[in-house]
Amino acid sequence: MRPCVHVLFFVWLLTCPCGTHEQEEEEEEEYEYILEVPPEEDSDDRPSEDAKPSPRALLCPKDCKCTQEGVVDCAGVDLREFPIELPEFTNHLSLQNNQIEEIPPEDLTRLYRLETLNLQNNRLTSRGLSDDLFEQLENLSYLYLANNKLTLAPRFLPSSLISADFAANYITKLYGMTFGHKPHLRSVYLHNNKLTDAGLPEDIFNSSRNVEILILSSNFLKYVPKNLPPALNKLHLRNNKLEKIPVEAFSNLSDLRELYLQNNLLTNEGMSNETFGKLARLEYLDLSSNNLMHIPGGLPRNIVILHLEKNNIRSISKDVLTQIRNLEYLLLHNNKLRARGMHPDAFLGLKKLHTVHMYNNLLEKVPAGLPRRVKTLMLLHNQISSISKNDFATTYFLEDLNLSYNKIMSSTVHRDAFRKLRLLKTLEMSGNSLKSVPYGLPRNLEILKLKENDISSVPHDTLSGLSKLKELYLSNNKLKINSVYTGAWVELSSLQLLDLSGNLLSYVPPDLPESLEYLYLQSNKIVTISDNAFDSTPNIKRIFLRFNLLTPETVKESAFHGLEKLQVLDIESNLALPKVSKKKVVEKEKEEEEEEEEEEDRRR
Ligand SMILES: *[C@@H]1O[C@H](CO)[C@@H](O)[C@H](O)[C@H]1NC(C)=O
Ligand SMILES: *[C@@H]1O[C@H](CO)[C@@H](O)[C@H](O)[C@H]1NC(C)=O
Ligand SMILES: *[C@@H]1O[C@H](CO)[C@@H](O)[C@H](O)[C@H]1NC(C)=O
Ligand SMILES: *[C@@H]1O[C@H](CO)[C@@H](O)[C@H](O)[C@H]1NC(C)=O
Ligand SMILES: *[C@@H]1O[C@H](CO)[C@@H](O)[C@H](O)[C@H]1NC(C)=O
């Protein structure tokens, strides 16, 4: 590859100064190719040393890189002033990450062919930019001024503008001609400024009907700006002070796909059931972190993702959601929902709705009429105290159910409650008041979490048939060796992880399944490790035995012999450390590491 590049370069040097027009074009292509040489080749310097340089190449400010095509890169070279000796034909100028405070008008207007001007991350102030500074750059399309110290937007910008980034300044005011009369303008970034309603004239987008992206997040707006361009695709208004949305505010935005309104002061009184009605293409609506008491009516049917979390929503009426036929994600966590406030037909016909988050609410039971196609249902951190027979009778598609941190008791879980959940893979009921492992667990479970309950028994057959279970968490319960029915573990023929830490076990459970790789037994009352404790688990990789009652005498070292895959045996913080075992493991880990390294070497 490299020799070839050199040859090309050499050829170009020989032919360059005397070529015809046609040749020039070819050569330019070659030159582009040469530019791809890695920096250490130092190709930039060569023309001036080895051959007659083209006059253009001479004009390039110190520390900058210039190309024949008019690309000038002075990014991050600690410039304090706008560079003056720029080639006149510059059309792409990178000056980001410098310390420039002002731009003398004559220095910029000289660069009349500029198309891209990147001034991000400098120290430009509004005083340092004259009002019509940019207007004369008749081809300026991309103007990046983010991360400066501007307090006012430029009063005039050229009509050729396509994209303008003014984010992260201190802008309080825009003018009618800042973004008005720009037929090509597509995107405007104004987030993280200090704009108030008074700083936005009503005509900011006069004759700029093609703006597709308008980002106004993190300002101080109380109202949605008027006369928004009808081509808008994305409108971001999060983190403002919006209290009200005028009825007509979005009425012309039939192309809008993404609307961010989160983190404002919106109330239901501040909007009507027609506010969103015309947004026929809206797919993403975020109304989270506002002051809504209920779900606004009239939401358009094509919404796919609806964020309503972190409001004060207390109820869901019959017909606020059902028309959103394309809804897939409904996020309602951190509200004040009660099951009795939710109409049983609230989700009727929402066939695409597969993810519902209702955690951190006040649900006293599982809401009736759950969407039939729901796959992921997050009900954790509520007040649910029972699971009745029909709570999940119609949610055949459920794969992931989280009921952790509720008030569920063993006596209130119906034995047939989960019978229809043939596809359920993950069931979490940690942090409840279960006294035993529930009956009727779905057969295809892969992960079962029952941490932090009061479980003191694993009744006969509760784990039978869970042949796909890979991970079982029973930590921080009250299990003893004899509270688990005989043969419970060995039936779990796919089990890889068993967490029994924080229980009352007095020795390592017998009959662990052969598939087991991770065994957590720390913080129990284990007094002895017998010879054959791990006979049934030849695949074990990690064993945790910290905080038990073991002594060197009661740990039979031979128990760990033959465990070829063992990587970690954590047995510290017992009554006394069995020294030999520890050392052995350290050595073993070392060996493992070396082996891994070797393997990597081999792969290289
Ligand atoms: C602006 O762009 C157009 C179209 O590419 C071109 O014809 C014209 O010469 C450019 N003007 C300047 C001043 O470079
Ligand atoms: C915008 O349009 C309105 C109504 O047509 C007009 O009164 C106003 O002067 C225009 N402003 C600009 C900056 O074009
Ligand atoms: C919507 O468009 C119509 C016709 O262009 C215009 O009269 C009206 O003011 C626009 N409404 C808003 C809120 O921009
Ligand atoms: C909006 O609400 C009003 C009164 O509350 C009702 O008459 C009207 O039918 C509703 N419109 C829609 C589109 O839901
Ligand atoms: C279920 O809830 C618990 C408790 O907050 C959490 O740790 C866990 O990640 C949740 N599960 C899923 C799949 O989100």
Image: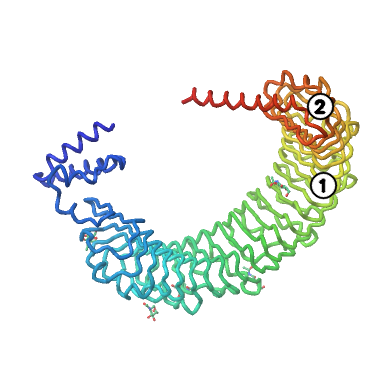
- The residue where tag 2 is placed is 552
Q: Is residue 469 visible?
A: no
Observer-side mark, 2 or 1, equals 2
Tell me if mark 1 has few (under 14), some (14-19) or many (20+) residues whose alpha carbon lies within 10 angstroms of its own: some
Above or below, 329 relative to 426: below
The picture places residue 283, in percent across and down from the top left corner, at: 55, 56
Query: What number is the disc on residue 500?
Result: none
- The residue where tag 1 is placed is 390
Q: Amino acid at mark 1?
A: Asn
Task: Name which residue lies at 39% across and 61% down.
Answer: 120
The picture places residue 212, in percent across and down from the top left corner, at: 43, 62
The verdict on label 2 being within 8 Å of ligand 5 is: no
Above or below, 424 relative to 177: above
In three-dimensional space, the C-alpha distance between marks 2 and 1, rounded to whole angstroms, equals 54 Å
Frontmost residue, 168 versus 395? 168
Label 1 residue SS: loop
Q: Amino acid at mark 2?
A: Pro
The picture places residue 569, in percent across and down from the top left corner, at: 72, 29
Q: Is residue 455 visible?
A: yes
The picture places residue 229, in percent across and down from the top left corner, at: 44, 68
